[in-house]
Image: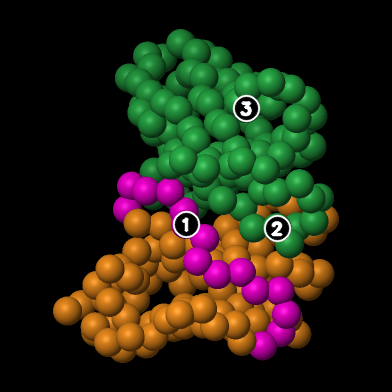
Amino acid sequence: QKEVEQNSGPLSVPEGAIASLNCTYSDRGSQSFFWYRQYSGKSPELIMSIYSNGDKEDGRFTAQLNKASQYVSLLIRDSQPSDSATYLCAVPLAAGNKLTFGGGTRVLVKP
Amino acid sequence: NAGVMQNPRHLVRRRGQEARLRCSPMKGHSHVYWYRQLPEEGLKFMVYLQKENIIDESGMPKERFSAEFPKEGPSILRIQQVVRGDSAAYFCASSPLSRSSNQPQHFGDGTRLSIL
C-alpha cells in the first residue's frame, strides 16, 4: 500500500460541474493535510489545508477530512477550464515535517 | 517578491559536471525543504534544513548529493558528477519558524535540470 494514494485520472468533468478528488493515507497519526494544484511545467501551489475532521470551504474549494477512515477529499464546485491541472494530496507522515505526496489526480475541465 | 526564490530556472549540464541549485526561502521562513520530481513521477522529499543544520536527509541519495543552508545566503543543493538520471525538476519549499508539521509549505518555481 502506498503511503499516500490518489487516483491518477484523468478526471474529466464538464464546465460548471463538481470535480471530486480522493486521497487515502497510511499513517493514522497524521494531523495535517494539504492540497496542492500543479499546472503542467509549473510548481505546486497550495490551495487548501485541513487539520480537523469535517469540511473546510474556501471559495469554490471544499476539503473534507475523515481521520477514522484515513481519507481526505477535495471538491471543486463550478469547475472552470482554468481548473484543469494535477491536484496533489500531501501529508506529513510519522514524526517530522517532510511532506509525502500522492501521485496526483489529473483533472480536465471541458468547456 | 516575497515568495520562495529559486535559481537558476533552467540548468543544463554535461555528464560528470557539478550542478548547484539555490533557494532563498520566503521572508520570515526559516525552514527549507528540497523535493525532486522526475519526469512523469510524483514529488519526492529529499532534505529538510534550518539555518546551519540538516534536520532530515532521509530522502537524499547516498552519493553525489549534498545540501546546506548557511547562516548567510541561500540554501544550496549540490549534485556532483551528474548523470542522465539526475534530469528532473528540483523544487524548494519553505515554512515559518515552527517544528510543527501543521505549517504549510510554499514552493518556489523550481529548477529544471537537464543532463546532456
What residue is pinned by disc 1?
Answer: A45
Identify residue type, mark 2.
Gln
Identify residue type, mark 3.
Ser
Which corner quadrant of the image does residue B112 belong to?
top left
Q: In front: B98, or B56?
A: B98
Q: Colour of chain B?
A: green
Look at the image and tell me whether residue A2 can be seen: no
What residue is pinned by disc 2?
Answer: B103
Quarter of the figure with the C terminus of chain B:
top left
What residue is pinned by disc 3?
Answer: B75
Chain hosting mark 1:
A
Residue A48 lies left or right of residue A66; in this view the side is left
Q: Residue furthest top?
A: B17
Residue A91 sits inside the magenta stretch: no
Identify residue type, mark 1.
Glu
Report the span colored magenta: A40-54
* B90 up-or-down from A69: above or below: above
Residue A46 sits inside the magenta stretch: yes
